[in-house]
C-alpha cells in the first residue's frame, strides 16, 4: 500500500511555502510604493530587511506598516546616512511622515529624533497650508467715502443724491449732478476674530490625535495670524501650546505638539478650565472657543457644567465611543455653540475652518 504521508507536505513545509508567498506579496507592495498587507509575526531580522527595502524604494507607507509590527527593527535602519535619504522623500510622504515619527520617536536618540521631527513638522505644515487656502478670514462690508476702485451701494447713493437735490425740481438727470461726495462706497475690511482652540492629544501608537492637533493648530495659526488666539492641547492635563498674547511662529506651534508625550489618559474638565482661563484674557466682546475631542474622558470630573462658562463653545466630535458623543453634544448645547461630528481625522481641519469663518 502506498504511504500517503510520504507525499503530503509537513506542517513546517506548509508554513515555509506560505511564508514565501507572503514575502512575494510584501516585496511586490514595497516595490509598487504601496502600504504592505498585514504581515504575520516576523523576527527582528526579517522586519529590518523589509524596512531596508522600503527605504531603498522610498516607500514611507510601507515603513509605517512595518513599524506597527516591530518599531525597534525599523528604527535600527534609520541611521544618520539613511535619515539623509529619508529627508529627500519625507516632504512628499504626506501623513505617513508624522505617523512614522510618532511610531519611532521613543526608540530614537535625541539627535535622530530632532532631525526626524523636522521632517514631520515640514510635512504637517505643507498639509496645513494647503488646507487653510485662501479666503478663510472673511470680509466685513463697511460704508465709507468713495475712492476709485471701491464698490458702491447704489440704493444708498441714490437716496443721498435725492436728499440733496431740491424737491421742487420736477426732473433731473442724475448723471449730470452726482458728486463724488454723494457716492456711498463699500469698503471691505477683514473680520477680526478672537478665539481659543482646545485639542485632544491623548496618545496612541501612531499619534493620530497628535497629528490631528498639529494640523488643526497650524490651520488656525495660518488663518488667524493677524488676530488674537490661543491653543491648548490636552491629555491627562492641559498644555498651553500658544498663549493668547504670545508671538510665535507656526513652525514652533507644530514642534511643541510633536514633542508631547503619548499619554492615553484624557482630562476634558481640566482642559476646559484652562480654556476658560485663557478666554478671559482675550480683548474681545465676542470671544469663542472650539474643542476637538471624542468626549470620552477617563480622568477628571464631568466637563459639561464648565461649558456654561463660555460665551460660545463649539465642538468637533472625533470618532469614538457612543457615550463620548453624548458628552460632546451636551458641551455644544450648554456652550451655545455648534456641534459637528466627523468620521475621520482628515475631516477636522475643514470643519474647523467652517466654524472660524462665522464663529458667532
Image: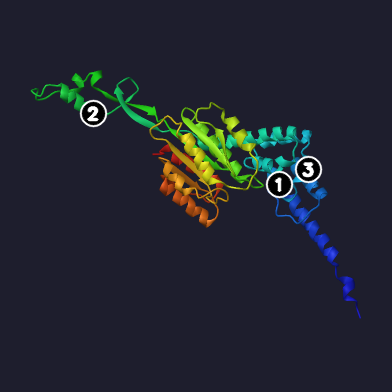
Colour convention: rainbow
124 shown above or below 331 = above
Between the residue at mark 3 and the residue at mark 2, the CA separation in whole angstroms equals: 71 Å
Q: Mark 3 points at which residue?
A: 52
- Residue 103 screen position, x and y as percent: 69, 44
Residue visible at 60% across and 42% down? Answer: 210
Residue visible at 38% across and 33% down? Answer: 285
- Residue 304 screen position, x and y as percent: 47, 49
- For the residue pair 207 and 33, the one nearer the viewer reads as 207
Between the residue at mark 1 and the residue at mark 2, the CA separation in whole angstroms equals: 63 Å
* SS under mark 3: helix
Q: Quadrant of the C terminus?
A: top left
* SS under mark 1: helix
Residue found at the very far front of the displayed protein: 301
Q: Dots 3 and 2: beta carbons under 8 Å? A: no
Specify the label residue 62 is tagged with: 1
Query: Mark 3 or mark 2, which has the lower sequence index?
Result: 3
Q: Mark 2 points at which residue?
A: 156
Amino acid at each position: 500500500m502506498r504511504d500517503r504521508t510520504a507525499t503530503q507536505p509537513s506542517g513546517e513545509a506548509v508554513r515555509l511555502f506560505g511564508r514565501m508567498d507572503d514575502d512575494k506579496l510584501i516585496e511586490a507592495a514595497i516595490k509598487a510604493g504601496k502600504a504592505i498587507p498585514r504581515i504575520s509575526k516576523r523576527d527582528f531580522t526579517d522586519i529590518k530587511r523589509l524596512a531596508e527595502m522600503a527605504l531603498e524604494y522610498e516607500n514611507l507607507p510601507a515603513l509605517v506598516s512595518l513599524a506597527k509590527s516591530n518599531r525597534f527593527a525599523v528604527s535600527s535602519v534609520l541611521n544618520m546616512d539613511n535619515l539623509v535619504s529619508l529627508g529627500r522623500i519625507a516632504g512628499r510622504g504626506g501623513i505617513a511622515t508624522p505617523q512614522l515619527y510618532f511610531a519611532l520617536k521613543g526608540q530614537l536618540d535625541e539627535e535622530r529624533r530632532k532631525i526626524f521631527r523636522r521632517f514631520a513638522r515640514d510635512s504637517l505644515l505643507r498639509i496645513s497650508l494647503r488646507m487653510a487656502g485662501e479666503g478663510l478670514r472673511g470680509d466685513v462690508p463697511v460704508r465709507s467715502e468713495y475712492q476709485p476702485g471701491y464698490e458702491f451701494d447704489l440704493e444708498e447713493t441714490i437716496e443721498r443724491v435725492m436728499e440733496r437735490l431740491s424737491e421742487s425740481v420736477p426732473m433731473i438727470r442724475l448723471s449730470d449732478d452726482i458728486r463724488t461726495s454723494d457716492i456711498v462706497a463699500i469698503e471691505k475690511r477683514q473680520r477680526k476674530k478672537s478665539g481659543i482652540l482646545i485639542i485632544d492629544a491623548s496618545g496612541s501608537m501612531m499619534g493620530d490625535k497628535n497629528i490631528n492637533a498639529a494640523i488643526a493648530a497650524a490651520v488656525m495659526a495660518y488663518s488667524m495670524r493677524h488676530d488674537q488666539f490661543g491653543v491648548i492641547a490636552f491629555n491627562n492635563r492641559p498644555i498651553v501650546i500658544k498663549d493668547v498674547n504670545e508671538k510665535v511662529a507656526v513652525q514652533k506651534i507644530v514642534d511643541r505638539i510633536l514633542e508631547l508625550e503619548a499619554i492615553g489618559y484624557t482630562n476634558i474638565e481640566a482642559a476646559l478650565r484652562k480654556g476658560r482661563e485663557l478666554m478671559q484674557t482675550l480683548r474681545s466682546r465676542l470671544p469663542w472657543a472650539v474643542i476637538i475631542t471624542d468626549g470620552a474622558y477617563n480622568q477628571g470630573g464631568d466637563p459639561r457644567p464648565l461649558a456654561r462658562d463660555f460665551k460660545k463653545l463649539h465642538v468637533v466630535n472625533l470618532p469614538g465611543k457612543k457615550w463620548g458623543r453624548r458628552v460632546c453634544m451636551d458641551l455644544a448645547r450648554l456652550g451655545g455653540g455648534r456641534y459637528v461630528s466627523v468620521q475621520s481625522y482628515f475631516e477636522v481641519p475643514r470643519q474647523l475652518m467652517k466654524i472660524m469663518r462665522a464663529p458667532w
